[in-house]
Image (spheres, helix red, strand yellow):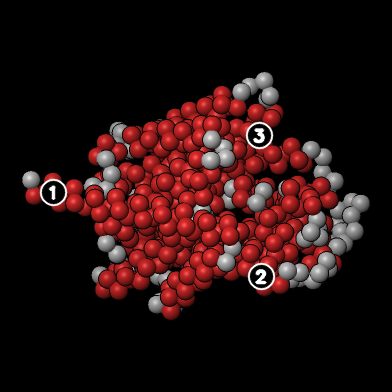
Amino acid sequence: MMGLGSAIGAGLFLGTGVGIAKAGPAVLISYIIAGIIVVFVMRMLGEMGAAIPASGSFSHYARIGIGEWAGFTMGWLYWFMLIMVLGAEITGASAIVHGWLPGVPQWVVALVFVTFFAVVNLAKVSNFGEFEFWFAAIKVAVIIAFLVIGVLLVFGLLPDTDPVGFTNLFGQGGFMPNGFAGIAAGLLVVAFAFGGIEIVTIAAAESKDPEHSIATAVRSVVWRISVFYIGSIAIMVLVLPWNSPQLQSGPFVAVLNQAHISYVAGFMELVVVVALLSAFNANVYGTSRMAYSLARRGDGPALLGGLSKTGVPTNAVLLSVFFGFVSVLLNWLLPDSLLSILLNAVGAALLVIWIFIVVSQLRLRPRLEAEGKLSLRMWGFPYLSWFTLAALGGLILLMLTDADARNQLISTAVLFAVIAGLSVLNARRRRAAAEA
């Protein structure tokens, strides 16, 4: 449920219209390609996670599989990426609630949300899991209802509706109105929609039976998310023409409006708020556990490596919450300058993390196999692992052909270089301390 909660966010509820606009109905191919890549990456991460459960997850595996610098760089790159996302999520949620309650300042709404989830994450880990379970359950229920209503609309089984069949799928310029270039452009939009699923292995490491929990989570979450994403997109392009203006502004609302359901726009606003708060809650957890893991390995301030009596890394949680609120302030104070630069810098960070997961698995698999630790295996090793690495490389080449994506790559490359440079300084500091 945590994997569903963190990956099914506003990107699905609001952002899918962008991909449809670029590729038309062929955005389904974009989602399938991205889905296959993510399934393989998660399988590799699950293989390592089930063999070596660690709250640092892919950062820890990069450290032992590639080198200390890789673990440091991946950990802090992920932390930085999620901290920036935290600000966007809480700002988006508070803006919607402020629209409902115009008399309450937006910063007050944001402060209430941040404070509430700080308390949740500072309490027992089970409390956090309980909140995330119910948040995710709401989103999953909404998507299932959407899929059911969508199928009824396609076959004209609802009152005052006619069957649409495949008219919209192959009309308006055909299935691929913008050709292969449209599929490629759509792939750039949707590839990052699956981001967040990797938090499953971080959370499962804290469960009672981490080896079993990680294996179960990876097996179930991957296909469920694929069904929910691809199923939802299929309904959208079947029910409405791909170039419909309504799909761009709010694809879920646009489809549900065809079913003549009252108050659907307001209801979906509520669902988006839940989605944003769920992702915020999950990302506070993810950033705090990553900072804790880095501190315990000597790759971060020792202050962040302490645990409360209930097993919560209190200082790491407070640090994440603090920077989450700072990023909210940046959203208000510097909306068109500093924050946009920071958000741009994390645009391709997820792609870098996926690449390091694949390289780590390629390096660790022979060792784990020799030690007899593999309870979950990546299919077709090493061929599918190398295929995934090549596919991620292809995504990078694709990004170089798009101006906006190219700027994200450059910003991420600069950020990566800075953090990698800090890892070298940290290694020297540790060696000096050991020699003293």
Distance Cα–Cα, label 2 vs label 3: 35 Å
Name the foreground residue: 332 vs 336.
336
Residue under label 3, please give it.
96
Label 2 neighbourhood size at 10 Å, few (<14), some (14-19), many (20+)?
A: few
Q: Position of residue 100 (x, y in %)?
A: 70, 28
Residue contact between numbered discs 1 and 3, judged by CB atoms under 8 Å: no
Taking the spot 74% from the left edge, 37% from the top edge, the residue there is 266
Residue under label 2, please give it.
181
Taking the spot 33% from the left edge, 34% from the top edge, the residue there is 315
Q: Earlier in the sequence, mark 2 or mark 3?
A: 3
Q: Quadrant of residue 375?
A: bottom left
Taking the spot 36% from the left edge, 56% from the top edge, the residue there is 417
Residue under label 1, please give it.
432
Q: Earlier in the sequence, mark 1 or mark 3?
A: 3
Q: Is residue 380 left or right of residue 425?
A: right
Q: Amino acid at mark 3?
A: Ile
Distance Cα–Cα, label 1 vs label 2: 53 Å
Q: Secondary structure at mark 1?
A: helix
Extreme residue toward the left, this view: 436
Q: Earlier in the sequence, mark 1 or mark 2?
A: 2
Distance Cα–Cα, label 1 vs label 3: 51 Å
Residue 106 visible to the viewer: yes
Name the foreground residue: 359 vs 55.
359
Name the foreground residue: 387 vs 166.
387
Q: Is residue 399 above or below residue 93?
A: below
Q: Amino acid at mark 1?
A: Ala
